[in-house]
Image (tube, helix red, strand yellow):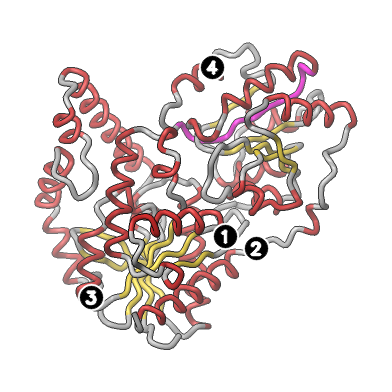
Amino acid sequence: MTGIKRILLECTGTYKTEVNTGIQRVVRNIIKESQTIGKDLEVKCLPVISRHSRLWKVDKVAGYHGQLWNNFIIYLKNVYKNFCSLLYAIFPFRPVGRFLFPAPERFGLSSIIRTVFHIAILPTTLILYFCRRKINPRKGDLLLMLDSSWAYPIWPAVKWAKAKGATVGLVVHDILPITQPHFFVPDTIERFQVWFDQAVDTADFFVTVSQTIHNEVKKYLEFRRPAVNWGDRLDSFKLGSVIDNVIKNGPVRDELKKISENSDKPGIYLTIGTIEPRKNHKYLLDAFDKIWERYPDVCLCIVGRSGWFSDAILERIRSHPKYRTTLFMFNNLSDTELDYCYNHSKAMIFPSCAEGFGLPIVEALQHKLPVLASNIPIFKEVGGEFCSYFDINDTYSLIKMIIDIETKGKMPQIRNPKEYKLPIWKDSCRELLTKSAALYEKMLFV
């Protein structure tokens, strides 16, 4: 790679948490494959995290803390969030809300707590510094921001790296809080908007995870900065399909085995995704309530952690008369158990209203599992002729599809999934690094 000496792969969010949604899977796999691909491209790839407004090298992406410590941190965060929500309920004024729920880089209660915490762990920071874990960016470095960096204060470290001569690239997973704000809580919308405004001002180029998101980002950037030729600063790449943390013959909870292996059941319809409004679980349950009237033994298994605006749908699931008989929900499956679900299901249903990519589609197709997906542009891009599509504005569209499957005993006529050219993470990583290098070279002449 002409000009690039090092690629610094920012992975702060994945390193510091045990969350395992699509973004974390992308980050882990890209960093894993970058060690081999970097050698092929003759460039050194280093995973780095943001800490105390600087960049620090890490040896591995996940496993920062044990599960007990992570659960404790999640508990503290929930206590903090509930405390702030209670204060805001007592004092429902906009300035109070901004102080209690500030966007990254803005002054508020969280920044005060963070400052106190940083002072408390100063000895640890000094130890890391003298152990030479600190990265000193320089000309010839490409800082490639891979992670969900809108969730933490990333920009002081990024601006510091840029001031030292590094070029900055940003991987954009989606901009849904901007284009589809009605699916998100106000706090998330403001955080994301502030973060992306900073990205527009700071990043030298953008690489998106799909052509659909590429088009949305380009449209937004041209609106924000019409004088800039964004065609030279934008590209996209394809994601891989293999679940990375699967343990061969690993543990699978008995409850999941009983559901999947019960011969009295005609097969399981699987849906995967965080339980939040845009994943459209309400549509799915509305459809299955009608399906169960005719086929009471049809099974639906919902897999995904609890997200925002999820209380109503979670209550509906848990209080449903079919719950734990033909309606099941798991909020904390391991990758091994997720792989088990893919291998023991009849079909996967993906009813989302909006996505940045839709990783479960390629994961399901990789397992040769038929996919029934909502008829939205990103799914058409990802699944093409290998998925069956239903109208999310009409529950009868999905109802008819499933009734036909149950009546005729076969899936809708689609192109054979065995012909689907499955992307692998090695190819995905190579495409990302190669295209990032090309954009880096363009920036040298801007």
Amino acid type assigned to the residue bearing label 4 in the image: Arg
Find numbered disc 3 in the image and state the secondary structure of the residue it sits on. loop
User: Residue 211 location, x and y as percent?
Assistant: 56, 59
1 vs 3, front mark: 1
Residue 239: image quadrant is bottom right
Find numbered disc 1 in the image and state the secondary structure of the residue it sits on. loop
Q: Is residue 244 above or below residue 138?
A: above
Observer-nearest of 232 and 435: 232
Residue linked to disc 2: 423
Q: Residue 136: which disc? A: 3
Identity of the residue drawn at 43% across and 49% down: 175
Between the residue at mark 4 and the residue at mark 3, the CA separation in whole angstroms equals 52 Å
**If the image is split into quadrants, where does the N terminus sit?**
bottom left
Find numbered disc 4 in the image and state the secondary structure of the residue it sits on. helix
Identity of the residue drawn at 35% across and 37% down: 71
Residue linked to disc 4: 316
Disc 1 and disc 4 in contact, CB within 8 angstroms = no
The stretch in magenta equals 295-306
Residue 183 painted magenta: no
**Quick one: label 2 or label 3, which is nearer the N terminus?**
3
Between the residue at mark 2 and the residue at mark 1, the CA separation in whole angstroms equals 7 Å
Between the residue at mark 2 and the residue at mark 3, the CA separation in whole angstroms equals 35 Å
- Label 3 neighbour load within 10 Å: few <14, some 14-19, many 20+: some
**Quick one: label 1 or label 3, which is nearer the N terminus?**
3
User: Residue 241 location, x and y as percent?
Assistant: 62, 56
Residue 298 painted magenta: yes
Residue linked to disc 1: 239
Between the residue at mark 1 and the residue at mark 3, the CA separation in whole angstroms equals 30 Å
Find numbered disc 2 in the image and state the secondary structure of the residue it sits on. loop
- Label 2 neighbour load within 10 Å: few <14, some 14-19, many 20+: some
